[in-house]
Image: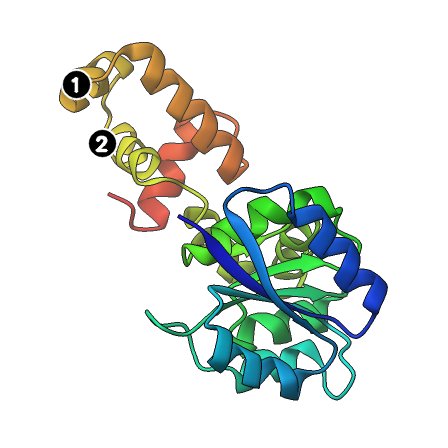
Amino acid sequence: MEIPILICAGQSLMRSGLSSALVAEPDIRVVGETADGSTARALARELNPAVVVADFELADMTGIDLVRELPGPSREAPRTLLMAPAEDDAVLESILAGATGIVTRNTLVEDFPQAIRATATGHSFLSPDIAALLLGWVRDKQPALLPALSLNLLTFREREILALLANGMSNAEISKRLCIVQSTVKFHISQLLRKLGLRDRLQAAVFAHQNGVI
């Protein structure tokens, strides 16, 4: 499936560099480029892009302003991938404005295709440095939110296995219940431990009970 995108950035070098880098991607097509948000709004209606890639600094407004002024995500409306400064306030404001994906302004152009594809399918995308910044902010200022954010990192299968583990099932019992081999169970457990920042399955069981997973 082809992903039509609109690039909106105040700097012509940024627009041309990103556009040139995406030419090699067979499933991504740049349908328009502009330096200002007001033109981006008009082009979004005219060209119907799946994703609007917007820089934080535009000729007439900020990228956050543009995200606010574009129609919210729907079957017809474009998703937004915003290039934001690596600062707490900017990232949080971008999330609240409704950006589907957020990367830093110094993200390598070769990393954009993955971000665009994820954003186009409606999956929230945060580049690793943005995710680290956000989690650091939560740890420092809103620690009560950390379990909920951590759980969102788990796949459906990982949450399923976490619940069974918390109910006292062994790897063999989980394997039999889910009709998967034990090596796959071990892999999923190692993944969920890593994502949750836990040391062992005992900590995982306690975490699951404390956060209503089972």
Q: Which residue is label 1 attached to?
A: 179
Residue 15 quadrant: bottom right
Residue 134 quadrant: bottom right
What type is the residue that disc 1 sits on?
A: Cys
Residue depicted at x 31% and y 43%: 209
Q: Is residue 56 above or below residue 163?
A: below
| Residue 125 visible in rendering | yes
Residue depicted at x 46% and y 28%: 191
Tell me the crowding category of disc 1: few under 14, some 14 to 19, or many 20 or more residues within 10 angstroms, Cα based: few
Q: Tell me residue 47's x, y (percent).
A: 50, 73
Q: Which residue is label 2 attached to?
A: 167
- Residue nearest the observer in this picture, 153 or 24: 24
Q: Tell me residue 146's x, y (percent).
A: 52, 55
- Residue nearest the observer in this picture, 1 or 111: 1
Instruction: Determine whether, in the image, residue 125 is placed left or right of residue 174.
Output: right
Numbered disc in front, either 1 or 2: 1
Give the distance between the C-alpha atoms of the residues marked 1 and 2, in whole angstroms: 18 Å
- Residue nearest the observer in this picture, 157 or 108: 108
SS of the residue at dot 1? loop
Residue depicted at x 52% and y 77%: 44
The C terminus sits in image quarter: top left
Q: Tell me residue 148's x, y (percent).
A: 43, 55
Q: Tell me residue 78's x, y (percent).
A: 46, 70
| Residue 86 visible in rendering | no
Instruction: Determine whether, in the image, residue 165 is placed left or right of residue 42.
Output: left
Tell me the crowding category of disc 2: few under 14, some 14 to 19, or many 20 or more residues within 10 angstroms, Cα based: few
Instruction: Determine whether, in the image, residue 153 is placed left or right of residue 162.
Output: right
